[in-house]
Amino acid sequence: MSDTTFAPSYGPVAIPVRELLPWAIFGGLLLMLAIYFIGAEEGATSLIRGTYVHEFVHDGRHLLGFPCH
Amino acid sequence: MVGKLLLRGMLVGLVAGILAFAFARVYGEPQVDKAIAFEEQQAQAAGEAPEPEMVSRAIQAGIGLATGVLVYGAALGGLFSLVFAYAYGRLGSLGPRGTSALLALLGFLAVIVVPGLKYPANPPAVGNPETIAYRTELFFIMIVISIAAMVAAVGLAQRLWNRLGAWNASIAAALAFLVVFALVKAALPDINEVPESFSATVLWQFRVASLGIQLVLWTVVGLGFGAVVERVVGVRDQRGPARRYA
Ligand SMILES: [Zn+2]
């Protein structure tokens, strides 16, 4: 923050793809897994046996727009 | 840098989720209750034994709903931050707040509105349990196609930007997106499993509530995320080289 300027500092600097990629892959997968558990686990497909997850998040699943039942 | 964006995205998403939960409690739960009452009435009329309650209604409408909406909100915010991390600096000269707001608008259209026009949200009692796999598959196919079409439309707008100007390039891209949507909507099979005697009012109000929940989520994420990352992302001075805050 050493340089100050009178001109407004406009002009976005893009993040290089190689810096972004590992985050996008690992973060993206984990976040999508979270959405999968809320939206589809024990519905169309099932990673865990039973129907507890489905029943627990049931109202959210319907109201968030996922197919259910 | 990306880690900071991701953390902020998830936190903003969590806040969005809390607000969306409040919205869902007030506008969504009454419709869910009415739909479940209809379901039980139908089962009774058919002489079926009532389904055993594994999770009580109070838990489903309380901590269960909160868990669903908050986790969804945080995950949405996190994924949004990753898309932002790529888009920022690649969408013309838009700053962080503008990039965030535009992404949220396009995302809301591509992920929620357009797939929802083809496969809308349904309350309990609507939907045949035997077709759940089929319906889920179509729902996600629709979302994937819609996102791909939106990405292509943004690319098209950028390509036409200099030749046609901002307005015309955007209109051309929007038209291209609409054409793809119209074709896909006609090509994919329809699903209509609403029981004959189900209340049209409850169905309408449920779908409006469902859309409202998403609108709360995407609005808070789109406007909130831009605000909290304003000092995180890099900006270029007009005279100096590229530099980054924080
Ligand atoms: Zn259900």
Image: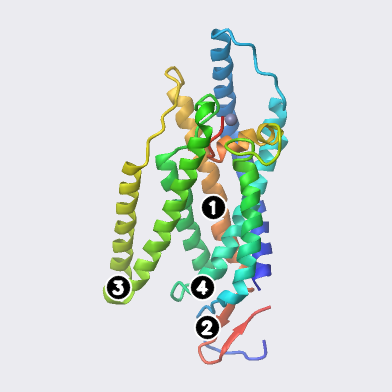
Amino acid type of the residue that numbered disc 4 sits on in the rendered structure: Gly
Provide the secondary structure element on which disc 3 rests.
loop
In the picture, which quadrant includes the N terminus of chain B? bottom right
The chain letter for the residue carrying disc 4 is B
Report the residue marked by disc 1: B218
* Mark 2 and mark 4 on one chain: no
Is the residue at mark 2 in contact range of ligand 1, meaning its CB lies under 8 Å from it?
A: no
Provide the residue designation for mark 2: A8
Judging from the image, what secondary structure is the residue with disc 2 in? loop
Q: Amino acid at mark 3?
A: Gly
Q: Are marks 3 and 2 on the same chain?
A: no
Q: Chain of mark 3?
A: B
The mark closer to the camera, 2 or 4, is 4
Locate residue B189 relative to residue B164 in the image: left or right: right
Q: CA distance from mark 2 to mark 1?
A: 30 Å
10 Å neighbourhood of mark 1: few (<14), some, or many (≥20)?
many
- The correct choice, above or below, for B115 with respect to A68 in the image is below
* Relative image position of residue B115 (x, y in whole percent): 44, 45
* Residue B108 appears in the figure: yes
What residue is rendered at 56% in x and 75% in y? A17
Mark-to-mark CA distance, 1 and 3: 28 Å
Marks 1 and 3 belong to one chain: yes
* SS at circle 1: helix
Q: What residue is pinned by disc 4?
A: B95
Q: Dot 3: within a 10 Å radius of its alpha carbon, few (fewer than 14), some, or many (20 or more) residues?
A: few
Q: From what the image shows, is residue B161 above or below residue B28?
A: below
| Dot placed on the residue nearer the N-terminal end, 1 or 3 | 3
Q: Residue B236: image x %, image y %?
A: 54, 84
Q: Can you identify the residue that label 3 sits on?
A: B165
